[in-house]
Image (cartoon, coloured by chain):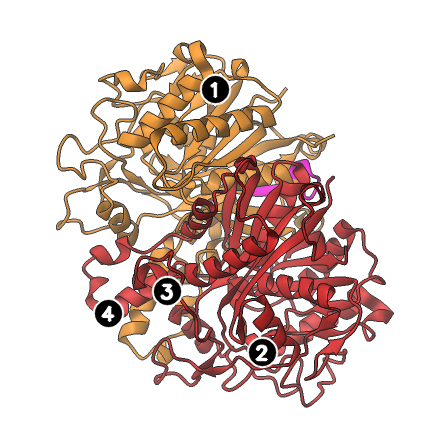
Chain colours: A red, B orange
């Protein structure tokens, strides 16, 4: 089975656009939370979110409607990752061995919402032109494949908050199988009012800020953005002398099969995902030196995740730093695990880990080292990245230093 | 050595019947599931016909609990999963649940319920809406529901890749079984008719008779073809590791043995490139199964009555199969069932498996006027014939071309 390495990264998140800016903000604990601007929140109890700011639309988009999709962030992050990897020009390569896999929770909704806000009666009239312009989720991979000249398999993973890691796992299997050389993978999201309302009415949103693992945590802050990686077989990367950020070692999937919205209280599914990831990666629990947590800041998730980390890492659970960048960039839903995968690679490359900000009061039920408030310089050889979605849909992946 | 993946259970919710027995009886008899649509008010629009699911009583399969919170697509999927599990005589107990995954393809599964919810958000006080109103609205919520109800704990994955979604889901399930990552996968596709989707296809003039002329029926490969008919349904398979299926003495419908997928370069690609890429997808798939074109004894075509898409497929088959293409039977179930977008690949897979088991090729109905440009051996009358190896084509004009090989279990 070939080894698979990460050779290009791209980020668009609330506290920075582009990998350099975003990493600088993350490592310095810069909060991306602000007043939500893309729609009117006056009828809600929550008015804050982690929106991407000062974004310049890529010229690939024809107009405001076509741009009003996850495509705008995903495309920008993908373009950055592609250029970073040195694969912008693939003339002469077998294009059918280049594929695309992107995750989203609701990438199809923002353009629809945008149109319906402009013409609220259109729904009753069958939308006429309105919905005809909206995109199925697969249009994002179509756009990327078309624009980058990739002609291999492509898919959109629709798996709520673990969508990005599902896409990465799917791509890794294709690379292992030897069917492709290069995969563009990741996730993108643009805050849909529909999802904001869904979380709001489930009382899952924090009013001010996201405080993962803190005793006073009040829920998640909704966010948006995109994280994209280029992954390829080591053989292909070596032949073209590519810069390597990290090795993608493996993944573990599981499904709680427990409840549509609540996680399994003892973290049965989370434990299974982490255990399987370690097993596929052929990595011992003793080798992991940083956990990039799912850490949403909801009361249930953070307890469940802490319990499951203790179960998997046993006596080492207290030694391993665990941090949640959702404290700074919010919960970017389908993009979250992809963004966290990019950040995991940056931690390895830059020998530093981002903090969990807004951490003040320890919770006796969450008693691990959460890297409170300040980033930490340390050698990082192996990162475990968790994602746990609604419906108990869990995917963990593992990166290590190459 | 790769493991083999076999199908041991089939669950069908279709416009031609509930359960694979009725589905097959109607399909093999040349009955059509296409009629004026009843679930939508189309009085303002030209295109009226569709292939709707009728007569499903989901409570029969799922009980009454929580039923009022579920949308149409989730009822389709849940019912078909239950049917497939019963058909496979498979009970997912505690031990098996960690070795059972669910992998479903859907292009825009619950889009219409999601947009209904947003419609309420836009018109009412959104913070006053009940959380139960959004219980079953995300595109993947049907799959989450099935995982909870049937105790599926190995993984749950929804793939959306347009019209090839369920082909890609079944292909992915094959790979996960081959790699030993799971013993059982519930794999298939789900799609529903809604006004939102109707409008997407209607405005893009993809539906039959959208140009205002001809009959509003599905006429794949026929010279008169003028667009596709929308269809809905859920088609689900219990796919198992071959050794596991044998160990429990399961009845085996067939083996899924190959998958291939190639992207044709997007909406603006020319016909030549599309033909080449569709051919490459078929070739990749046949190679993946360790076969050659001479082994294929039936092509279950994508043929959806689209002017361009049928032409591309016919040319691609001719180029890949050469002279053999004059003999190899080609049929398409979409003549009777319409185009079920993300669920079509699974719909075709159900037909392919049943062809193998019944030694019968269902007719491509409405095939009357041969198009010289689509010069294939189209089966337009029920054909009794031993079927061993079927190539399933699944193409999307946006660029995806995915194929599967289903063969007789030896």
Number of the front mark, 1 or 2: 2
Residue B358: image tag: 1
Q: Residue furthest bottom?
A: A361
Q: Residues within 10 Å of mark 1 (few under 14, many from 20)?
A: some
Q: Are marks 1 and 2 on the same chain?
A: no
Quadrant including the N terminus of chain A? top right
Residue B68: image tag: none
Identify the magenta region. Answer: B177-186
Number of the front mark, 1 or 3: 3
Residue A118: image tag: 4
Gap in angstroms between the C-alphas marked 1 and 2: 60 Å
Q: Are marks 4 and 3 on the same chain?
A: yes
Q: Is residue A176 above or below residue A193?
A: above
Depth check: give the residue in front, A59 or B152. Answer: A59
Q: Is residue A29 above or below residue A381?
A: below
Residue drawn at (26%, 40%), measured in percent from left and top?
A: B206
Q: Is residue A253 visible?
A: yes
Dot 1: element: helix
Residue A328: image tag: 2
Quadrant including the C terminus of chain A? bottom right
Image position, residue A216 (x, y; %): 62, 88
Residue A110: image tag: 3
């Amino acid at each position: 089975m070939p080894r698979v390495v990460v050779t290009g990264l791209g980020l668009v998140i609330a506290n920075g656009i582009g990998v350099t800016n975003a990493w600088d903000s993350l490592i310095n604990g810069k909060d991306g939370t602000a007043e939500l601007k893309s729609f009117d929140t006056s009828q809600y109890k929550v008015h804050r979110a982690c929106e991407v700011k000062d974004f310049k639309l890529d010229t690939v988009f024809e107009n405001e409607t076509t741009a009003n999709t996850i495509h705008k962030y995903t495309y920008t992050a993908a373009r950055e990752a592609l250029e970073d990897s040195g694969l912008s020009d693939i003339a002469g390569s077998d294009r059918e061995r280049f594929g695309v896999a992107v995750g989203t929770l609701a990438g199809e909704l923002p353009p629809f919402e945008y149109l319906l806000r402009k013409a609220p009666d259109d729904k009753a009239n069958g939308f006429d032109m309105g919905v005809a312009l909206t995109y199925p989720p697969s249009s994002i991979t179509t756009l990327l494949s078309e624009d980058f000249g990739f002609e291999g398999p492509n898919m959109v993973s629709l798996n709520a908050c673990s969508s990005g890691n599902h896409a990465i796992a799917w791509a890794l299997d294709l690379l292992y199988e030897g069917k492709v050389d290069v995969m563009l993978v990741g996730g993108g999201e643009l805050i849909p009012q529909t999802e904001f309302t869904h979380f709001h009415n489930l009382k899952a949103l924090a009013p001010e800020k996201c405080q993962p693992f803190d005793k006073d945590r009040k829920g998640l802050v909704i966010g948006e953005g995109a994280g994209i990686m280029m992954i390829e077989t080591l053989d292909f990367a070596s032949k073209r002398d590519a810069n390597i950020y990290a090795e993608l070692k493996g993944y573990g999937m599981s499904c709680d099969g427990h409840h549509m919205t609540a996680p399994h209280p003892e973290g049965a599914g989370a434990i299974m995902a982490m255990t399987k990831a370690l097993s596929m990666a052929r990595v011992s629990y003793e080798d992991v030196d940083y956990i990039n947590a799912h850490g949403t800041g909801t009361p249930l998730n953070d307890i469940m995740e802490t319990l499951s980390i203790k179960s998997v890492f046993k006596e080492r659970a207290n030694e391993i730093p665990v941090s949640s960048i959702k404290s700074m960039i919010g919960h970017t839903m389908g993009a979250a695990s992809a963004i966290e995968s990019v950040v995991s690679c940056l931690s390895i490359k830059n020998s530093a880990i981002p903090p969990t900000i807004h951490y003040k009061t320890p919770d006796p039920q969450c008693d691990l080292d959460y890297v409170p408030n300040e980033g930490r310089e340390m050698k990082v050889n192996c990162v475990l990245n968790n994602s746990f979605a609604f419906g108990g849909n869990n995917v963990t992946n593992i990166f290590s230093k190459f | 050595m790769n493991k083999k993946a076999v199908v041991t259970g089939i669950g069908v919710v279709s416009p031609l019947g509930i359960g694979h027995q009725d589905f097959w009886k109607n399909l093999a008899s040349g009955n059509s599931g296409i009629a004026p649509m009843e679930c939508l008010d189309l009085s303002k629009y030209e295109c009226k016909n569709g292939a709707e699911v009728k007569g499903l009583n989901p409570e029969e399969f799922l009980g009454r609990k929580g039923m009022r919170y579920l949308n149409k697509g989730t009822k389709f999927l849940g019912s078909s999963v239950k049917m497939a599990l019963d058909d496979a005589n498979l009970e997912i107990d505690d031990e098996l649940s960690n070795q059972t995954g669910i992998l479903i393809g859907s292009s825009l599964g619950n889009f219409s319920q999601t947009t209904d919810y947003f419609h309420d958000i836009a018109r009412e006080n959104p913070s006053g809406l009940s959380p139960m109103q959004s219980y079953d609205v995300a595109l993947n919520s049907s799959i989450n529901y099935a995982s909870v109800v049937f105790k599926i704990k190995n993984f749950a994955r929804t793939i959306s890749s347009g019209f090839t979604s369920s082909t890609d889901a079944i292909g992915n399930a094959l790979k996960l079984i081959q790699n030993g990552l799971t013993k059982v996968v519930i794999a298939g596709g789900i799609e529903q008719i809604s006004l939102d989707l109707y409008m997407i296809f209607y405005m893009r003039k993809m539906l039959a008779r959208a140009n205002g002329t001809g009959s509003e029926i599905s006429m794949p490969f026929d010279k008169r073809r003028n667009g596709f008919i929308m269809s809905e349904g859920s088609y689900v398979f219990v796919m198992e590791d071959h050794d596991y299926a044998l160990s429990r003495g399961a009845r085996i419908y067939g083996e899924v043995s190959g998958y291939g997928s190639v992207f044709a370069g997007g909406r603006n690609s020319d016909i030549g490139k599309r033909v080449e890429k569709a051919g490459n997808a078929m070739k990749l798939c046949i190679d993946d199964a360790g076969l050659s074109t001479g082994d294929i004894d039936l092509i279950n075509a994508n043929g959806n009555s689209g002017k361009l898409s049928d032409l591309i497929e016919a040319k691609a088959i001719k180029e890949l199969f050469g002279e053999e293409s004059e003999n190899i039977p080609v049929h398409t179930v979409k003549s009777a069932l319409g185009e079920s977008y993300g669920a079509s690949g699974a719909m075709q897979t159900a037909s392919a498996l049943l062809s193998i088991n019944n030694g019968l090729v269902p007719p491509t109905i409405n095939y009357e006027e041969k198009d010289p440009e689509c010069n294939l051996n189209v089966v337009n009358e029920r054909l009794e014939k031993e079927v061993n190896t079927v190539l399933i084509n699944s193409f999307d004009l946006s660029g995806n071309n995915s194929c599967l090989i289903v063969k007789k279990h030896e």
